[in-house]
Image: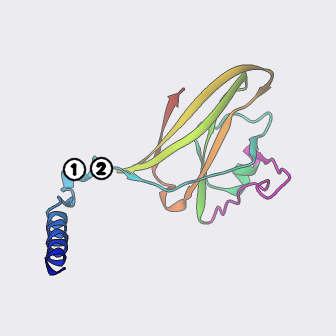
Amino acid sequence: MKTTMKKVLFALAAVLALAACVNKKTAPSAAEGSRISNEVAFEIAKNYFFNNGQEIPANPIITTEKDFSRLFGMATLMGENGKPTEIDFNKQFVLAVVLPITDIDTEITPVRVEEKGDSLVYTYEVKTGEKQSYSTQPMSAIIIDKKYADKEIKLVSQQK
C-alpha cells in the first residue's frame, strides 16, 4: 500500500512540475502592442427594423435615442423574447449595418468587434439565400459600451 501511495505522489509531483514549465505569455512590447487587438463585448439589438423611406446611414455609429428612433422601429412580438432589446444611450451606443432593399433572403450576423489602437473593427457575415416573393431591407444592430464611441469604425463584411 505504501508503494502505491509513493507512486501516486510521485506521479502527482511530476504533473505539477510539468505544469509549472508551461510557457507563459509575457506582456507585449510597445511595438507589438499597436498590432494586438482586443475583443470588445457587444449585444445584438433584437426585434428592430429599418424604417421605410430612411436613407441608409453613411456612418454606422448611432449615439442618441433620437437618431436611433428616426432610423429604426420596434418589432414587438408575442412571447417572452418578443420585446426589443433595451438600449441605454447614456451608457451605450449602436453600430448598425443596413443593406439595400432586396428580394433575396439575406441575413446579417455579427461575428466580432475588436479594438485595434484608435479603431474598432466590426466583422459581420452576410448570408444570402433564395429569391423571395417580397422585398425586405436587411439590417443588423449591435450595442456596445459608450467608452468606445470615439473610435474610428472599420466594417469588415464576410460573404457566405
The region drawn magenta spans 70-90
Please name the residue shown 46% across and 55% down the image.
40
Q: Is residue 59 visible?
A: no
Image x and y of residue 82, in percent: 79, 53
Task: Quadrant for residue 66, please give it.
Answer: bottom right
Instruction: Name the residue beneath numbered marker 2.
Output: 36
Going by the image, does 19 lie left or right of 37? left
Q: Residues within 10 Å of mark 2 (few under 14, many from 20)?
A: few
Mark 1, residue position: 32
Instruction: Name the disc covering residue 151, or none.
Output: none
Q: Nearer the viewer, residue 90 or 113?
A: 113
Please give left or right for residue 37 compared with residue 100 in the image. Answer: left
In which quadrant of the rendered view does residue 96 lie?
top right
Q: Position of residue 113 (x, y in %)?
A: 47, 48
Residue 18: x percent and y percent?
15, 63
Secondary structure state at the residue bearing disc 1: helix
